[in-house]
Amino acid sequence: MFSSKIKQLISVLQQLPSIGSKSAQRLVFYLLSEQGRRIGLTIANSLEDVMANIGNCRRCRIYTEDRICRLCSNAKRDTRILCIVESPVDVYAIEQTNAYQGLYFVLLGHLSPLDNMSPKDIGLPELFRRLETEDINEVIIATNTTVEGEATSHYIVQHAPSHIKYTRIAYGIPIGGELEYLDHYTLRHALSARMAIIQNTREKKKDGF
Ligand SMILES: [Zn+2]
């Protein structure tokens, strides 16, 4: 029914995550419509440019058009703290908080024997080399809190140089969250990762309780 070129584009788009056959068809027909053609050509040009010119930073492996990315070459960043994340998207998420001033290392995946992802595939030899040669005193492991993310975190801590302090991002109850809606796993972690609350005796008297 469709031209083979159209079928080809639909099947290519379907290879993208979260695009099913219906969505792919809808996108292709939109791109072929009068208002869609200009957007289609802009996307095509931009894709070609990005695919040809964007690679991975040699130090942190984030996507960049430079050899060393802007984060790694920013003299204002604290080079003694390194945050390990699974994907470049995680770097953008953390940067948006404005709460972190250190550097990053992007694994571009997680350890997964099922998907044939070995320590080498996620850049651990490069990471360990950095930890051995650079003046880093804290490593924050911010891999996802999935089974694979936890296994990756565990592997890193067990195999990385021992002179560095390793911390794991905290997880548990979201801000504004109510306990009754949490799953058991999250609540168990929230309990085991509880924090001390410092008592301010002066304020206690002032409140009159
Ligand atoms: Zn970088």
Image (cartoon, rainbow, N blue to C red):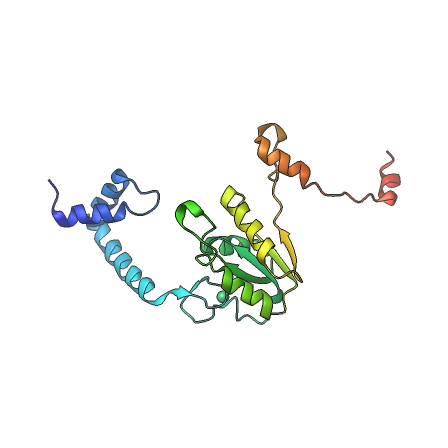
Q: Decide which of 203, 200 is in the foreground and name it.
A: 200
Residue visible at 13% across and 47% down?
A: 4
Q: Quadrant of residue 201?
A: top right
Q: Quadrant of residue 49?
A: bottom left
Q: Position of residue 190 (x, y in %)?
A: 64, 38
The correct choice, above or below, for 70 with respect to 207 in the image is below
Residue visible at 25% across and 39% down?
A: 21
Res. 143 in view: no
**Where is the C terminus found, in terms of image quarters?**
top right
Q: Position of residue 27 (x, y in %)?
A: 25, 45
Residue visible at 61% across and 31% down?
A: 178
Q: Position of residue 130 (x, y in %)?
A: 55, 67
Res. 48 in view: yes
The correct choice, above or below, for 137 with respect to 117 in the image is below
Horizontally, is 65 left or right of 73 in the view?
left
Horizontally, is 99 left or right of 209 in the view?
left
**Where is the N terminus found, in terms of image quarters?**
top left
Residue visible at 46% across and 63% down?
A: 61
Horizontally, is 154 left or right of 198 in the view?
left
